[in-house]
Amino acid sequence: MIEKIIEKLNLLKNNSQKGYRCFQEKDHYYGLDKEGNIVFLIQSNNLKPVIMQETKHLMLIKNLKCLLSIDGKENKGYFDIIICMSKDCGHIRAFIELTNMFENNNPDLSITDYFLYLKDLFTHRQKISARELQGIYSELLFMHYIYGKGVDLYRYWQSTDRMKFDFSINDTKKIEVKSTIGENRVHKFRHEQLVTDIFDIWIVSILLRKDDKGLSLYELANIVKQECGHNLKVVAHIQNLLLNYPIEDLKSMKFNKAYTIENIALYKAIDVPKFQGRQPNGVSNTEYDSDLNNISNRAIEEFFEWLK
């Protein structure tokens, strides 16, 4: 779908000084402005004065009376518009992917919400490390695996980097995903992830095996985005994490999917070897490796019951 929209945009040429040359997708429009910037438009039912917001790469205009040229026919009306002024290919793909979710998403989300997600997405971010990419792969794979069993964990995925837990089911129920490329199930934990009087925590342990014929991070991210196309927050978060990586880099990170699925194990935090007791006064951020090879994992049915 994204490729088709890009192809259609590449065929457009806008020589008009009065409006936008466009084509329709579902109930919205894509087109070009007179500077050749890509625009996303929806009909506005609000006839209040024009509202504008602008960043380095984006512009939001609401309630603008303008002219759309579609297949040689002119359409005058009031529209809400987001303009992508970036020429970066990654930004353009992300812009189209997120805006094209408009009809399928929560009706409470406005075009301003989409603008704010894109604004955050286009803010310059540093690349995350290869180890963190491995962690993202594991989290996406686990969500995809569980989704195939009829359970939607996407809505519980933490959308802010470096939070204490990967999934927050409610105020007290938390899930942490750990992965390793080694054959021994040894993971690094923060002490507070295992010893707490507040949280009820499950640990998901995943073994990965590199495989040139395996499932790539690029493919997995696209599978997940298809499955949670109703959830703008999740798709925007995936885009945010991976945007600064060339597609070829994401395609080159491959793991054997069958091996990974076979080697998913579930534990309660109380099962995991750890130092007993809370961190002493004056000590914080304690980390250590825990070996899970010699403890019994929990049944997935128990995990599903806990999720309820």
Image (cartoon, helix red, strand yellow):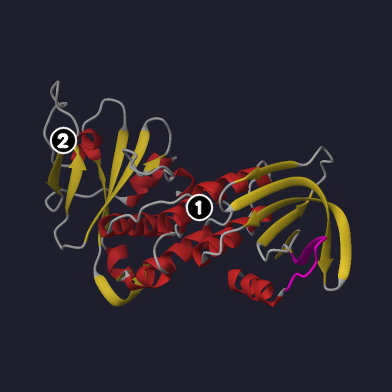
> What is the magenta range?
13-24
Q: Which residue is labeled 2 in the image?
A: 286
Residue 175 position in % (x across, y down): 34, 43
Residue 248 position in % (x across, y down): 39, 73
> Is 247 placed above or below 94 here?
below
Pick the front one: 194 or 304 = 194
Residue 49 position in % (x across, y down): 81, 38
Which circle marks residue 39 in the picture? none
SS for dot 1: helix
> Is 80 placed above or below 211 here?
above
- Quadrant assignment for the C terminus: top left
Q: Residue at x 61, y 47 (%)?
A: 115
Q: Residue at x 86, y 73 (%)?
A: 72
Q: Nearer the viewer, mark 2 or mark 1?
A: 1
- Side of 307 relative to 197 (left or right): right
Which quarter of the figure has residue 209?
bottom left
Q: Tell me if residue 278 is in the magenta stretch.
A: no
Pick the front one: 14 or 107 = 14
SS for dot 2: loop
- Side of 68 relative to 92 (left or right): right
- Quadrant assignment for the N terminus: bottom right
Q: Which residue is labeled 1 in the image?
A: 122
Which quarter of the figure has residue 302?
top left
Q: Tell me if residue 20 is in the magenta stretch.
A: yes
Q: Is residue 152 visible?
A: no
